[in-house]
Image (tube, grey):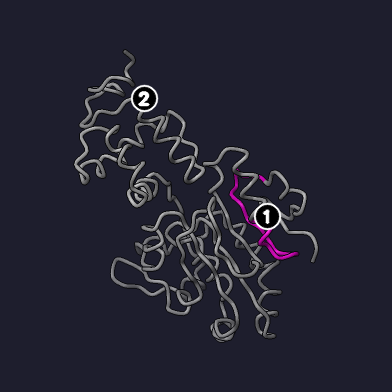
Amino acid sequence: MSALASATSPFGGAVDFDYRREDFQALSKLVYADAGIVMPEGKAMLIYSRLTKFLRDRGCATFAEYIRLLNGDAEERRRAINALTTNHTKFFRENHHFDHFAREVRPRLVKRALAGGRVRMWSAGCSSGEEVYSLTMTLLGEDKSIARQIAATDTAILASDLADHVIEAGKAATYPAHVAEEMPPRLRQNWVNANGSEIVMSALVRNMVRFRQLNLLGNWPLKGMFDVIFCRNVMIYFDEPTKAKLLQRLCEVLEPGGFLYIGHSERLVGSGAQVCEPVGPTIYRKHGA
């Protein structure tokens, strides 16, 4: 019997729950089917560590028993997949994207908004909100009087994620105080409030953003098209067919002339590469404007 198949020490050490290779394989297939996330065997212990709390809560003695529960309980299945998603992020991560947005995109969007036009942006895979708040602060900018005018226009920013617990964290808009060091000083001064050992995003920033739970591989109940889409460091967990399908759908809801920003280790593949041109490192502009 292999180490992985042992009920007492599947990974070379004692465990509290019977966890076999076939359990890992069943769970990895479940995560792929529901979220498109590929879980190689190197993630087997991560799955174990993140799900044991749920086994205890539901009184399951083995992973096989818990998997049977998942197959018949959609809500528990959703909770388990939420627990297995990775949510690493920071303010102004890959800051060349925000520099490009401020320099090349923001001026035209602000001009349109102040002239009465519609502006829509989307942070797809927003995690706990750092990305979308970085984008919102950059849009509002350093001049508070202009920012208040922008906030009064038909401008909105969608922030979506698969995991509802990070959506709630994003709505709370509260972070450890030390992360303020990641922000440009003028934007931090304008849009961040100190609260003891924490910081809170200002009401003007929070009110620009609409958080929604959304599976990028499921239905998108979206209204209208987007001028800007950030979908960064999400596709690194997908296989090539899933990446191509997602990128095609993102490009379909991107306005002609709109901009798509993806992660530093990602690339545009499939039909999306035919309708967008690169305009910077992992920055793409849709044809047709």
In the image, farthest residue toward the top: 1
| Whether residue 248 can be seen here | yes
Q: Amino acid at mark 2?
A: Arg
Crowding near pointer 1: few (<14 within 10 Å), some, many (20+)?
many
Name the mark on residue 21. Answer: 2
Where residue 95 appears, as percent x and y from the top left, is 57, 57
Residue at image point 56% right, 52% down: 232
Q: Is residue 222 above or below residue 17?
A: below
Range of the magenta residues? Answer: 250-267
Quadrant location of the C terminus in the rendered image:
bottom right
For the N terminus, the image quarter is top left
Count of picture labels: 2
Element under disc 1: strand
Q: Is residue 255 magenta?
A: yes
User: In this orientation, which residue lies closer to the viewer: 248 or 65?
Assistant: 65
Q: Residues within 10 Å of mark 2 (few under 14, many from 20)?
A: some
Report how far apart the C-alphas of labels 1 and 2 lie in the structure. 40 Å
Q: Amino acid at mark 1?
A: Ile
Q: At x 64% / y 68%, what residue is drawn?
A: 102
Left or right: 238 as drawn, with respect to 20: right
Examine the rendering and report whether any part of residue 141 can be seen.
Answer: no
Is 216 one of the magenta-colored residues?
no
Where residue 156 sits: x, y (%)? Answer: 56, 74
* Nearest the eye: 68 or 6: 68
* The quadrant where residue 153 appears: bottom right
User: Does 230 appear above or below 157?
Assistant: above
Left or right of 96 on screen, residue 17:
left
Image spot of residue 23 (x, y percent): 35, 30
Q: Which residue is mark 1?
A: 283
Q: Nearer the viewer, residue 202 or 273?
A: 273
